[in-house]
Image (tube, rainbow, N blue to C red):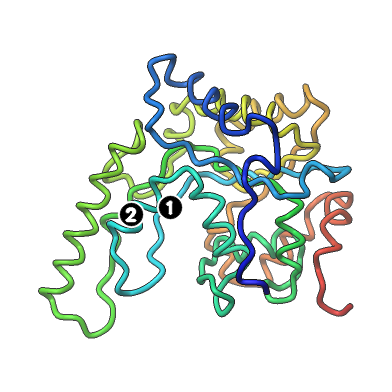
């Protein structure tokens, strides 16, 4: 795996890519929208436009990661408060991964298997993600400040210090994301319904113009799924719903592969070229 592989810039995808997504936020916040607030731009693979069937993968939201035991939560917040967060985390977790210059993030490694049916290590991950687009439905992250765990042999004093720094870092997110909810550790169905992000998704859809949407979220399906289907249907786009890669049953690799088997045949055929094992 080439550790120098970087997320493509917006210029490699669509004209006025940056401004197009800024316009999407105005739908939600109006003309008074503060342009310094963050909107994580979708990942758009360098070859996405060239594909005869353009596939957009939709997840729920962004989550702050801790890639090293000694990593500063403040530094990670700085990372999260950058517009290219989705693109960078996809490179580091879905493409590079552990042992290749990236890091272990089961959600993204399982996502590869859900899509291709192949084991993470046996997937042409660069080829796969050069061909796909990925977008997080909600435009703000969840608050994981209360879920930090004490690991290793650190003292209670050091643990409290880290936890305080963790919470202080999350406090800063209110300055980056206008609707960030402090103390809410995961996206709820109520959040999705009340967020108004379906209008932002509609704008994003119009920019990316996919032929197939793969929505990896039961919560999106059960709340605004009908609207997502309607947007797809009105534009001749297929719409497929699968569970979120964090689904507890996906701790079993066999269940992940079985779920891939439930994808429509045409979609499995498109994605099969990236399953390299056994060739």
Could you say which is closer to the camera, residue 193 or residue 16? 16
Residue tagged by mark 1? 63
Please name the residue shown 38% across and 65% down the image.
Answer: 66
6 in relation to 24, above or below: below
Q: Residue 115 at x, y = what percent? A: 73, 58
Please name the residue shown 29% across and 73% down the image.
Answer: 70
Mark with earlier residue (1, 2): 1
Residue tagged by mark 2? 144
Could you say which is closer to the camera, residue 9 or residue 216? 9
Q: Residues within 10 Å of mark 1 (few under 14, many from 20)?
A: some
Q: Quadrant of residue 238?
A: top right
Q: Quadrant of residue 55?
A: top right
Q: Element type at marker 1?
A: loop
Q: Element type at marker 2?
A: loop
Could you say which is closer to the camera, residue 183 or residue 174? 174
Task: Give the left or right position of residue 97, taking residue 83 as reference.
Answer: right
Task: Give the left or right position of residue 93, taking residue 8 as reference.
Answer: left
Please name the residue shown 86% across and 53% down the image.
Answer: 270
Q: Quadrant of the N terminus?
A: bottom right
Q: Residues within 10 Å of mark 2 (few under 14, many from 20)?
A: some
| Disc assigned to residue 72 | none
Q: Are marks 1 and 2 in contact (CB under 8 Å)?
A: yes
180 in relation to 243, above or below: above
Viewer can see residue 103: yes
């Amino acid at each position: 795996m080439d550790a120098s592989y970087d997320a493509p810039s917006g210029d490699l995808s669509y004209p006025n890519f940056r401004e197009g997504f800024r316009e999407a936020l105005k739908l939600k916040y109006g003309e008074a929208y503060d342009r310094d607030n963050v909107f994580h731009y979708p990942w758009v693979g360098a070859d996405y436009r060239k594909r005869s069937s353009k596939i957009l993968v939709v997840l729920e939201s962004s989550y702050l990661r801790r890639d090293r035991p000694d990593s500063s939560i403040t530094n990670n917040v700085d990372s999260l408060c950058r517009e290219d967060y989705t693109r960078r985390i996809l490179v580091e977790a879905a493409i590079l991964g552990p042992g290749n210059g990236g890091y272990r993030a089961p959600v993204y490694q399982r996502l590869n298997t859900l899509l291709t049916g192949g084991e993470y290590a046996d997937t042409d991950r660069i080829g796969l993600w050069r061909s796909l687009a990925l977008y997080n439905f909600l435009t703000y992250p969840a608050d994981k400040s209360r879920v930090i765990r004490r690991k290793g042999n650190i003292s209670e004093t050091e643990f409290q210090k880290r936890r305080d720094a963790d919470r202080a870092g999350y406090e800063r997110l209110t300055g980056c994301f206008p609707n960030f909810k402090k103390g809410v550790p995961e996206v709820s169905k109520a959040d999705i319904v009340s967020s108004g992000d379906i209008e932002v998704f509609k704008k994003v859809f119009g920019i990316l113009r996919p032929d197939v949407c793969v929505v990896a979220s039961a919560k999106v399906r059960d709340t605004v799924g009908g609207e997502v289907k309607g947007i797809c249907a009105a534009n001749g786009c297929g719409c497929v719903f699968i569970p979120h890669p964090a689904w507890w049953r996906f701790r079993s690799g066999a269940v992940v592969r079985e779920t891939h088997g439930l994808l429509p045949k045409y979609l499995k055929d498109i994605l099969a070229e990236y399953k390299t094992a056994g060739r």
